Image: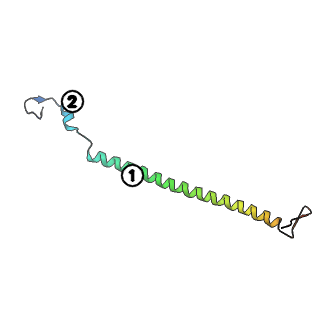
Amino acid sequence: MHIGIDNRREIPPGSTRVRSLRRGGFTLIEVLLVVVIVAIIATVTIVQLQYNTRHAELTTLRYNEATLNQMISVVTVHAPGNSVGGCRWAW
């Protein structure tokens, strides 16, 4: 048997009052565990965000490169002195 805070009467083990007296908040281990889990999730999220940003930049660069190559080929074909379909461009 456990003697309660008021020291006047015995409280049986496992009773609600004993549990409520011992459990006032979170333990340090519980708080540290939550902090570690949140840090791991944040790290994974940041790394994935950086990868997605870099992937988007590379995709945009490839698209721009393809567009510029098409424009260069059009300008090269239609440049003065080149004939396309019998037509000469007057620049």
At label 2, the amino acid type is Thr
Kindly identify which numbered label has been placed on residue 39. 1
| Outermost residue, bottom side | 81
Q: Residues within 10 Å of mark 2 (few under 14, many from 20)?
A: few
| Outermost residue, right side | 86
Q: Is the Cβ of the residue at disc 2 closer than 8 Å to that at disc 1?
A: no
Q: Residue at x 79, y 65 (%)?
A: 75
Residue in front for this viewpoint, 86 or 32:
86
Residue in front for this viewpoint, 2 or 43:
43
Provide the residue designation for mark 2. Answer: 16
Q: Residue at x 64, y 60 (%)?
A: 61
Residue 4 percent coordinates (x, y): 12, 33
Q: Residue at x 78, y 64 (%)?
A: 73
Task: Note whether 19 is above or below 51 in the view shown.
Answer: above
Residue 12 percent coordinates (x, y): 15, 29
**Helix, strand or loop at disc 1?**
helix
Residue 74 percent coordinates (x, y): 79, 62
At label 1, the amino acid type is Ala
Q: Residues within 10 Å of mark 1 (few under 14, many from 20)?
A: few
Q: Is residue 46 left or right of residue 29?
A: right
